[in-house]
Image (spheres, rainbow, N blue to C red):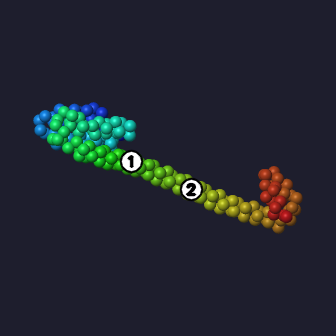
Amino acid sequence: ASPPGVPLAAAALGVVVPVVVAQLSGGLDPLMFEAVLLAFVVARWSPLPKAVALGLLTVATPVAVGLVQDPSEVAVAIWIMGTIFPWLTGRALARHGQLVEELGATRRELAEQALLAERRQIARDVHDLVGHGLADRVFHAIDGRLDRGLGKDVILAHHVEHGLDRQVAVLFD
């Protein structure tokens, strides 16, 4: 994402053209420094294809100045290297920003997964607790019916009506 306001392509032209034109006034170094800063800005806040294109434009600025002015008065190679380094630094910071965003998203996802795992564990614990309690009550009820003299067949018939015939049959085996 680029900073709000002026598109970076327009800002790039707004820096590069005056740098080339201003070389006649002798105020070249401060303007060349603006081109170097532009290299950093376009690298940091532009998507890669646009950053490469605008970065090449900023790297071409010292070459264009060298064509307009006496090349011995402009250290073209130094300004090219001085432009490439901030551009690379800007790309590194852009990548760092992407990685920070990905890390944040991954952390949120892991927190959500941990929360869901905890909910599943609680559900299993509640299921086990309720299931064991219910089984205990059924065993006591069957035991009480047997104590009252009800036969196995009567108890099984009652539980067949309620769909518990297999569970109760295991008790008598």
Image mark for residue 95:
1
Residue 159 falls left or right of residue 74: right
Callout 2 amino acid: Ala
Where residue 82 appears, x then y in whole percent? 25, 46
Q: Give above or below for 156 relative to 143.
A: above
Image mark for residue 87:
none
Residue 64 falls left or right of residue 136: left
Residue at the limit of the structure toward the bottom, as seen here: 147
Callout 1 amino acid: Arg
Mark 2 vs mark 1, foreground winner is 1
Q: What residue lies at 23% left-to-right and 46% top-to-bottom? A: 78
Residue 50 falls left or right of residue 132: left
- In the rendered image, which quarter contains the C terminus? bottom right
Image mark for residue 117:
2
Where residue 165 appears, x then y in whole percent? 81, 55
Q: What residue lies at 44% left-to-right and 52% top-to-bottom? A: 103
Are discs 2 and 1 less than 8 Å apart at CB?
Answer: no
Residue 75 falls left or right of residue 163: left
Residue at the limit of the structure toward the left, as seen here: 25
Between discs 2 and 1, the one toward the N terminus? 1
Where residue 114 appears, x then y in whole percent? 53, 56
Viewer-proximal residue among 167 and 147: 167
Q: Give above or below for 130 relative to 74.
A: below
Q: Residues within 10 Å of mark 2 (few under 14, many from 20)?
A: few
Q: What residue lies at 29% left-to-right and 45% top-to-bottom? A: 84
